[in-house]
Amino acid sequence: MIKPPRLQPGATLGLCAPASPLFKRSELSRGLAVLEQMGFRVKLAPHARARHGYLAGTDRERAQDLEGLFLDPEVDGIMCLRGGYGSVRLLDYLDFERIAQHPKVFIGFSDITQLHLALARRCNLVTFYGPMVISLARPEPSPYTMEALRRAVCGQEPLGPLAPNPDDPWLECLVPGEAEGELVGGCLALVANSLGTPEEIDTRGRILFLEDVDEEPHCLDACLSQLLRAGKLHQAAGFAIGELAGCGPRRLEPSFPSNLSVEDVLEELLVPLGKPTLYGLPIGHGRHLATLPIGVRARLDAGRKELAILETATSG
């Protein structure tokens, strides 16, 4: 895997919207203020404020913005404004050969999973599953999130063990044991959607991290079952599951009279595989976000409730 140059003090982050638009102007100004407080300069892509229905501009505009930031010599790293939906529609418009010639730190989560998978497959590039501008636009941004991001993209040492969620440090060991391998994954629904495409996730011998938000247990069940039947879960070395923020049974309908819990689904589909499995990590959609480098070696010790990043994710 190609490691992008680490971000130096005063580095310029290029900001683009590959998926949905920001719906409040204040979210952009709040997020920019936090990034500047962290010591970064920022540069908005030309169509960052565009809107095309539920998309942040047309597919070509969003693709031009993303590719342009990789090629822009003034930009040191790239952060997405938000997720939502739409990243998959960029993939046929991007020149991955040109992007691969200009490796840069790339940060985002949720729908941005599609771009992480593509950049890994097509460019062999280490990327970062971490906060977006909208994540930093809260009235009280999380110091945990900001420090985790800074260490991941600016630090010179391996991240080591992920720090626990400061609000709720409890983690659940579903299957004890240790596994070591390259870290891959993302938002569960988007990882499942990658099957049968050129960006299909490769889990062979890897530690698979998964997270999602506001999904009911039967939806999580459907995505995990798809990955299971495709052999992706059998091939993985272990599983690091996020908080699954907001996920749980909500609808009371005759067709779902007795909904399983999130924990029931994980126990029925993951536990029988007998692979080290840890649940509840601060990944993705919670208030406190770890930044995970995708494509570097990690160690999962589920019994000790620890996921550790073993190598640096940047060069220089």
Image (cartoon, rainbow, N blue to C red):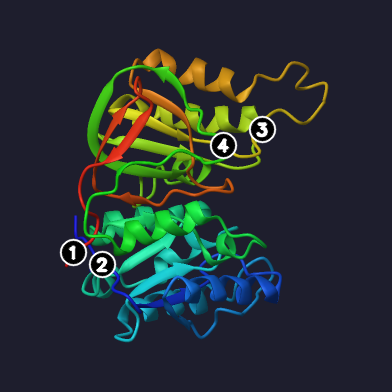
> Which amino acid, mark 4?
Leu
Quarter-of-image position of residue 114: bottom left
- Residue drawn at (42%, 27%) of the image: 278
Which badge, 3 or 1, comes first in the chain's sequence? 3
Which badge, 4 or 1, comes first in the chain's sequence? 4
Which badge, 3 or 2, comes first in the chain's sequence? 2
Q: Nearer the viewer, residue 229 or 106?
A: 106
Which of the labelled discs sits on residue 106, or is there none? none
Kindly identify which residue carries mark 4.
Answer: 244
Kindly identify which residue carries mark 2.
Answer: 6
Kindly identify which residue carries mark 1.
Answer: 315
Q: Is residue 222 above or below residue 28?
A: above
Which of the labelled discs sits on residue 216, or is there none? 3
> Which amino acid, mark 3?
Glu
Q: Is residue 224 left or right of residue 298?
A: right
Kindly report which numbered mark, 3 or 1, lies closer to the viewer in this rendering: 1
